[in-house]
Image (spheres, rainbow, N blue to C red):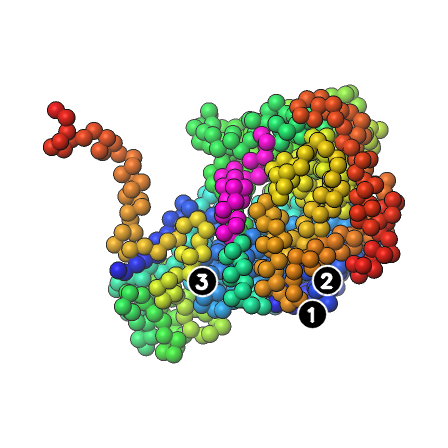
Amino acid sequence: MLKALTIDPGKCTGCKQCEMACSYVNEGEFNVSKSRIRVFDFHEEARFVPYTCTQCDEAWCQQACPVNAITTNEMGVKIVHDNLCVGCKVCTIACPFGTVNYNASTGKVMKCDLCGGDPACASACPTDAITFQDIEQTGFDKMKVWATKTTAGTEPTGPNAPA
Amino acid sequence: MGWTGKVLRIDLSNGTSKSEPLNMEWADKYLGQRGLASKYLVEEVDPKADPLGPENKLIMATGPLTGTCASTGGRYSVITKGPLTGAIACSNSGGYFGAELKFAGWDMVIFEGQSPKPVYVTIFDDDVQLRDASDIWGKSVWDADKYIKSTHQDQMIHVAAIGVAGENEVLYSCVVNDLHRAAGRSGVGAVMGNKNIKAVAVRGTGGVKVKDFKAFMDATNAGKKVLKDNAVTGEGLPAYGTQVLMNVINEAGAMPTRNGADVQFEGAGDISAEAMAEPRRTDGKPNLLTNQACFGCTIACGRISKVDETHFTIQNKPEYWHASGGLEYEAAWALGSATGTNDLEALTYVNFICNEQGIDPISFGATVGAAMELYETGVIDDKVTGGIELKFGSAEALVQCVELTGKAEGFGKELGMGSKRLTEKYGKPELSMTVKGQEFPAYDPRGIQGMGLTYATSNRGACHLRSYTVASEILGIPEKTDPLETDGKAGLVKAFQDATAAVDSSGLCVFTTFAWTLEDIAPQVDAACEGNWSVDKLLEAGERIWNMERIFNNQAGFTAADDNLPQRLLKDAAKTGPAEGLVAGLDKMLPEYYELRGWTQEGVPTNETLERLAV
């Protein structure tokens, strides 16, 4: 089963544990400036929004890369190969969402790779604002919320309904 | 590790800066943040120095766990000699600034001397610059934050700034970071203003390393689970914030009301956490919008609120029609109960202004409370207040006061001195609810006896955060004691003081201790830092820090006579509630406290104590 990061900003408190977990896994230290997931604080609107790569099927970054340093693995994840990346940054321009970024310490670009299938940000999130779900059901939680708001099913109407 | 091992020293008089290695011998004895920076301060600043002069220093310090994934590991403190008290001051703040300072590579920044003109300091990793602040001097914290991020084209910068209150050296002005988190007490903002520093802007791209990552992840994950499973840190604080206490403390009969004349406030329900969450009658929306975490915090007790746009405070001020830091319990108490005011929207607005102009809402509200008593008893009149009808319960008066205090205009100039100097000026010093010149916070010692000893002996003047015995006396953490009883409180206060000094030196938030004991904290510190940090070593460091602070104060001129409470608490019995008929029994606790501390009955640490602790 393919899985995807699912983000519910309404649950985010802005604690940045996801950024810490990401940088620890990828950089071996706590360094939020190198995190592949970022939390944005819209203070005056009382909103915090975590954002990261959604692993596009037809990925702009991948198509733009002149040296084929970005490939797709069996989970649909776009992976940057540091041994091939020349640091040209064209992918950072191509990505419409800004989720591929340059790492000045390595001279390569960096992006979310779902930690090889067990994303640390989702494990670290204390409020389940970030979860790792079946890729075909990422909308189900939202659907359920809307379903709750309808009156559907409160009156039985099927074949066994009382006359 | 845990520490970056680097101290940034900035000479404001000469406009220079340099990097120094952290004194690791001191780090092993004083850990970090409050303890370690206080060690630097007592070594470098004459206890008799004028707090508002170039000889005083101001230190912004992180702890070894700041900038790590330990829950709440994002704290920093501002350490200096406080102008409100003349005592050592250490004010702790959350937000994101502390962690960013660590990512920039610094354990602490020491500011010395005095800049000849207003500057703001940028610390972008190793690149440290003093920059002309003439565009933002006279502006608010919020404007300074916006200006700096825009000027440097970097939204990831974190700013700690003073408002106009700090510029005007209001004696209880604070340093505000990330718009609404504050190193709030003892007037640390006035010291920054006196040094002509408008703001410190930090951006870091480096990482924080710990001694043993595997052990650290295990210890911090275990700690997070304890916080999540605990009723206070896992449910109460995220849902209600510290405001969860408003009704609890009021029912306990320990809510200082109308300048401490009463111990219960009839309007407490109107300004409580529950009221913040209820839809307003005017617009159907609640005051509280959401909770917010500081850096790394898995509790998330912060309040984000929005004032009703039709309320008299902002109906003609659209610039305040947005969300910002809402009422915490201390602010709600000081602005509300201490002044007898139950208008939740007005209190939220006044709290916004406190954040925007860099004013400590505790000392401000308590000072307004004292001024209201002066006014109502006819000691001061409209001529003195400039026409403000300073009656208890008047939201309009409270709003007028806050708008004048930061600017130091009119009666605001007198309010900015704090209640001790204000009441002395008008010949009524007994009306100042202070210890060592600092206004006491939201717990009346007549109803929570341990807090009387806490206030009397706190090294930074009256304060609840030096030994929060409310946890034990009201909430039963770690075990329940009788709030009306003085027996056993000397030992309780000492134990809380020592443990808290260690927590304040680690980079963690003291609110974790609703759920954590040092048994939970020691493995986290030990996995991060060299030095075999056991519970015992943390407690010993805490006790060492406490004594070091005490010695500084003694050398500054404080004596046992200053370990006292306002006469009102000692002489006038509580009129209502569980504590009815009781006064604060300080005299029953203080001698035993000195003895347990290993101090003489004059409040001086004995040589034996100093040798034992190697202060």
Marks 3 and 1 belong to one chain: no
Image depth: mark 3 or mark 1 in front: 3
Q: Nearer the viewer, residue B409 or B345?
A: B345
Q: Nearer the viewer, residue A101 or B572?
A: B572
Label 2 crowd bin: few (<14), some (14–19), many (20+), radius 10 Å: many
Q: Is residue B325 above or below residue A21?
A: above
Helix, strand or loop for the magenta stretch, by majority: helix
Residue occupying the point 68% across, 54% down: B502
Q: Is residue B153 visible?
A: no
For disc 2, the marked residue is B29
Looking at the picture, which amino acid does disc 1 mark? Answer: Pro
For disc 3, the marked residue is A22
Q: Is residue B285 visible?
A: yes
In the picture, residue B96 is in which quadrant? bottom right
For disc 1, the marked residue is B21
CB-based contact (under 8 Å), mark 3 and mark 2: no
Q: Is residue B270 left or right of residue B172?
A: left
Of mark 1 and mark 2, the one earlier in the sequence is 1
The C terminus of chain B: image quadrant: bottom right
Image depth: mark 3 or mark 2 in front: 2
Residue occupying the point 52% across, 50% down: B226
Extreme residue in the bottom direction:
A83
Image depth: mark 1 or mark 2 in front: 2
**Given the image, what chain letter belongs to the residue carrying mark 2?**
B
Q: Which residues are magenta?
A: B224-248
Label 1 crowd bin: few (<14), some (14–19), many (20+), radius 10 Å: few
B228 drawn magenta: yes
Residue occupying the point 31% across, 62% down: A55
Coordinates of residue B274 in the picture (x, y in percent)? 51, 31
